[in-house]
Amino acid sequence: MALHEIQSVKGYVPWEDAVDIANGMGIPLARIYEVLTFYNFFKLDAPGKAVISVCTGTACYLKGNDKVLEEFKKELGIGEGESTPDRMFHLQVVRCVGCCGLAPVCVVNGKTYGRVSPNDVRNILDEWRAKLADDKE
Amino acid sequence: MAEIDIDKRFDIHEIAKNKKADLDRFQCTIYCCHSTGCKSSGSDDIISLLQDAVEEYDLKDKVRIVAAGCMGLCAQGPLMRVEIKGQKDVLYKRLEPLVARLIIAEHVVPALKLEEGETFELPEFLQQHVLSLDLPFFTKQEKVVLKLAGHMDPEDIQEYMAHGGYLALEKVLKTMTPAQVVDEIKRSGLRGRGGGGFSTGMKWELAAKVPTVDEKFIICNGDEGDPGAYMDRSILEANPHAVIEGMMIAAYAIGATEGWFYIRAEYPLAVERLEKAIKACKKNRLLGNNIMGTDFCFNIDIRLGAGAFVCGEETALIHSIEGKRGTPRPRPPYPTDKGLWGKPSCVNNVETLGNVASIILKGADWFASFGTETSKGTKVFALTGQVEHSGLIEVPMGTTINEIVNEIGGGVPNGKKLKAVQTGGPSGGVIPLEYMDLPVCYEELKKVGSIMGSGGMIVIDDTQDMVSLANFYLDFTVDESCGKCAPCRIGGKQMLLLLEKINKGKGTKEDIDELRKIAHAMQKASLCGLGQTAPNPVLSTLKFYENEYLAKVEKNEKK
């Protein structure tokens, strides 16, 4: 549960925190590492500011989300599970976000976009670029 | 004395009566879908806009706005249902903020002013947003688990009580022995809705037989990892109290002392609603010691999953609750003997528990009147893929696939043709066109090489290549294999390599034979359900669409 907390607050579980938990709770670090790497939910590296999750559930697959994913890759110049060098975007694929009625779906920092086509990709990115720039100011 | 005072405040009949009177004050109730699907289509904004509009027209005493659970037709979201006393209900689809405002101004306001006998026509620009409630999508369904979904505020325990909530718990605690409860569920014929289809009553009987030494657990499996399925999420979002009540009845029947909900962390809204519901139960003394003044003591906790498909398997799920890697272990011992922390535990699926309260209230015979000889009751399906009305449905067992896809689902859109239906997710198989009259029940689906599964039903049109589809599913299970046993870890990977080879046009006929060989070995030798069923999508596509495999292979061999 502690790991869930860290993951939701920081977006990943930093190495130092894992060591702290191991020491604090008297659990071998290897056990914690074992759990962290087993589940998809936990990340070991700091993600980008905007995390793009492209759903690859069956419904999304059938409705062509692979093309959307390709477009994201092309636009951002990164692959799955990677972040852009400026740490603005992180691209990942997820199993199913449970909005199959809206397929194909992608989620950016908790905001869900339904019925996405490859043509929408640039707009979504622009929207978030603007948003992230606003946050900076 | 003080005791009487407490009784009254927590008397569910009293609360229900007051709430009902309170709800009756309103002439108009607007249910706006507020589950994950519609929320992402913007229902948040619409609800706040409606509230503003109601304020503006000074209708606060007449109109009630409810953020409700899933109404089913997610593809047409956000959905909103306007119910005015004495008038026909109207369901709106694909709402936009502006339209929502106009509905208040041009529908609700004039409709409320009507005198008796007067009728009223909706203006044309609103008509185009109306979704007919006479659609087979709605009329062909039979709702038990989803009965209240979309018809109440899931975050209000009093409203659940006004609809008869917790009456089943009271009946059980005050008038039935645990053995009678087990017997009632057994007679109803309810079977595990997570996919396995084991008799729920039998499972409870086994769990009840193990003596409660210090602790015994009831666990609700809400780790819905099957891609393309979201029944459990919707049930928890739309009516969390029904699942909690089911769990409490189960706990009483088997003598459990504590309950655990294991929910995917990817379902934040379901978790939030469940947390609120548990809190409300505690506040109303429905959880804790001496519930409803009886000897029954029970508490509930939530544990979050972390994205591992294998954790839907009960022994893996138990490991995960304990905070370990979610890897399965061989059974027996079954969890009913040795489960969570070595204590006897009973694992039931969300939908299974969601059925319990209705069975207790209406009786086993009522429940058994739905369905077929061996599969009783109804089943919730997430109907998705290439289908016109994609969404959440509930039908009696025994409904044919044709009825589900073509009538309720409205068929395949864009002038394409139906090719097959896939059930059971990555553990299931495809059902080709010639079996469309197959009734949906545990046995019949198994006969054609698929399974009921948890309720994902994916419609595939004629443009889909089946070898790629098998590849897609296998890719998923290989990725999700926990790696504990060799047949699944190595077998899955080798099958995937062969499939990829065939898909790239480099396969040979021998590769197809090899696929079959590995698949059978995996089915027999894998430790848990994940490995045993992982080859199903390959085997069933091979069975019905071998020509597609052969075509790819032959193309290569001709080169």
Image (cartoon, coloured by chain):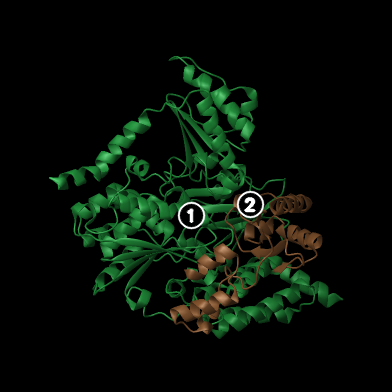
Q: Amino acid at mark 2?
A: Thr
Secondary structure category for the residue under label 2: strand
Q: Nearer the viewer, residue B72 or B244?
A: B244
Tell me the crowding category of disc 1: few under 14, some 14 to 19, or many 20 or more residues within 10 angstroms, Cα based: many
- Asked if labels 2 and 1 touch by Cβ distance under 8 angstroms, the answer is no
- Residue A27: % across, % down: 46, 82
Q: Return the chain for callout 2.
A: A
Q: Which residue is mark 2?
A: A112
Q: Which chain is green?
A: B
Q: Which residue is mark 1?
A: B270
Q: Nearer the viewer, residue B20 or B460?
A: B20
In the displayed orientation, state which residue is furthest to the right: B559
Q: Amino acid at mark 1?
A: Ala
Task: Identify the residue at image location x=51%, y=65%.
Answer: A5
Q: Which chain is brown?
A: A
Quarter of the image containing the N terminus of chain B?
A: top left
- Residue B109: % across, % down: 52, 21
Q: Nearer the viewer, residue B139 or B284?
A: B284
